Image: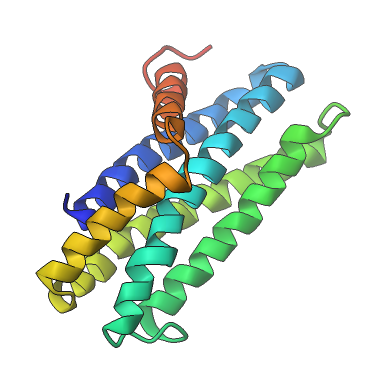
Amino acid sequence: MDPLQTLMDEHRVIERVLDALEQYLERSPRATVTDCQVELLRFVDFIQNFADKCHHGKEEDILFAEMVKAGFPREAGPLEVMLHEHDQGRAFVRELKRLGAKKDPWTNPDREELSTAASGYIDLLRQHISKEDGVLYPMAESKLSADVMQSIGQRFREFEQDEAGGGEHERLRCLADELAGRYLNSTAR
């Protein structure tokens, strides 16, 4: 298992969900508030559990830790930027979750907050993924030995079993497919 390829493959899944979230935003003014809230919480589920817990968890706990051991500073340069962007993304998602869980119908300001938080998250993650794929991962590949990369791959597999739980990773990939299917592969509803 090439761990960097695994992360890039996960990026493609995340990007599909970002595309679906973008379409959700375009359709949400025409949908009932209840439908919008339920769907928003499905996006939040995917983002929190796949993009953050599983994907960012592997990066932060395994890859970035190995990069620090290899001499990359954690508090400066690319790792600092990536960690800061992970935190920015979490702030956007907390806002999305708050809106999805709101008991009262959304007001116009709520819908504006939804648009701001979701668009902010989409833009942030697209740029973030581009930096990781184009800069950070090639840096890691050039500095980490084949043995370290093999160890990272094994630790990724263990992480998915231990942290994401058996079957959880597949549930989240199915959720990504459902969201993409609903928002990307159908005519506007």
Q: Residue at x 75, y 22 (%)?
A: 33
Instruction: Name the outermost residue toward the left.
Output: 146
Of residue 156 and residue 181, the one placed in the foreground of this image is 156
Q: Is residue 28 visible?
A: yes
In this rendering, would 113 be left or right of 47? right
Q: Please state the horizontal and vertical placement of residue 10, each as a whole percent of the image.
A: 32, 44
Q: Please state the horizontal and vertical placement of residue 179, each as a whole percent of the image.
A: 47, 24
Of residue 23 and residue 77, the one placed in the foreground of this image is 77
Q: Quadrant of residue 169?
A: top left
Q: Residue at x 46, y 33 (%)?
A: 168
Reply above or below: 105 against 134.
above
Instruction: Name the outermost residue toward the right.
Output: 104
Of residue 184 and residue 46, the one placed in the foreground of this image is 46
Q: Please state the horizontal and vertical placement of residue 9, each as a whole percent of the image.
A: 26, 44
In this rendering, would 32 be left or right of 137? right
Reply above or below: 95 against 141.
above
Judging from the image, the colouring scheme is rainbow
In this rendering, would 4 be left or right of 49? left
Q: Quadrant of residue 97?
A: top right
Q: How many marks?
A: 0
Q: Quadrant of residue 187?
A: top left
Of residue 69 and residue 20, the one placed in the foreground of this image is 69
Q: Is residue 127 visible?
A: no
Q: Residue at x 39, y 57 (%)?
A: 58
Q: Residue at x 59, y 44 (%)?
A: 118
Q: Please state the horizontal and vertical placement of residue 63, each as a whole percent of the image.
A: 33, 66
